[in-house]
Amino acid sequence: MIIDQQIYRKAFLNYLRTGAPILRSIQQDQPTTHYIWRTRRDNKVRSAHADREGQIYSWDNPPEGGHPGEDYGCRCTAEPYVPELSETMSLIMTGVSDAGKAWENNDFTNHYWHGNGTGVRLRDTGNLTAVVDEYQKIVEENLLGQIADAARRNIDGTFSWDFRTTYQMQHIVFSLGDTTIGGIFRGQNESNKGVLRIRGDLSFFLYDEFADPIDIGIELPGGTPYAIKDYWEGRADGIIMINRATSAYKYG
């Protein structure tokens, strides 16, 4: 069905700003297949409808009593579930902090000559936060898409996803070249009338080796290469469409 997208978008934005219910005439012509049930969240809401707060329903499959506002005396409203507006996935990094002032180039080089090969944590060099921030900018969209696709392969259950890639980080930290960052996502998802609710935790690792103190591609005698590594955690949370073709969250 072809409708005026601008009229619908205006009604949707007005709903977000003022809470004004979207006209039933627009709802009937809505371009979405689903909506989010919203109550007034007060003591007058009937218990059956209170249980539906935040739940997602299909316009083609109304719950008992009908869609919001259709049952006698119902004051509930339907919040449009538009994939590009309503789908959401977030990636939050945790356990990311630095132990002190960031090492300069000479600090990394001195450790090569005098550290006897002792590995260091990136946070102890004061550079973990900057590297993780850059990493998140690079991978967030693809990583969330991969998690979404893994969830679609394991609907209504627990699932996991392993990832590992090498990144160039010299523009962030002199000592990092081919830096391997990877980890695993472990979570669960629950389907509800065409959408998936995803929650889960990520464990990240980073590994590199400082073995080229003057950046000429060789190890120098008298010094000892050393590992640079670290670990941190993350949390992914979101609501996506099961139908991959209509979803903004997918990989490739």
Image: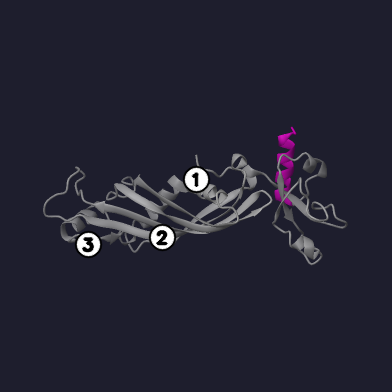
> What amino acid is at disc 1?
Glu
What percent of the width, then of the height, locates residue 189? 58, 56
Helix, strand or loop at mark 2: strand
Where is mark 3, residue-wise?
Answer: 118
Which residue position holds label 1? 141
The CA distance from mark 1 to mark 2 is 19 Å
The outermost residue toward the left is 222
Q: Is residue 122 visible?
A: no
* Circle 2 residue: 232
Q: Of helix, strand and loop, which mostly describes the magenta segment?
A: helix
Furthest-top residue in this view: 2
Magenta stretch encompasses residue 12: yes
Dividing the picture into quadrants, the one containing residue 244 is: top right
Which residue occupies the foreground of this view, 198 or 221? 198
Image: magenta residue range: 1-18
Residue at x 60%, y 56% (from the top left corner): 156
Secondary structure of the residue carrying tag 3 is loop
Which amino acid, by three-letter code, is at mark 3? Thr
Q: Position of residue 210 (x, y in %)?
A: 24, 52
Residue at horizontal 11%, vertical 54%?
222
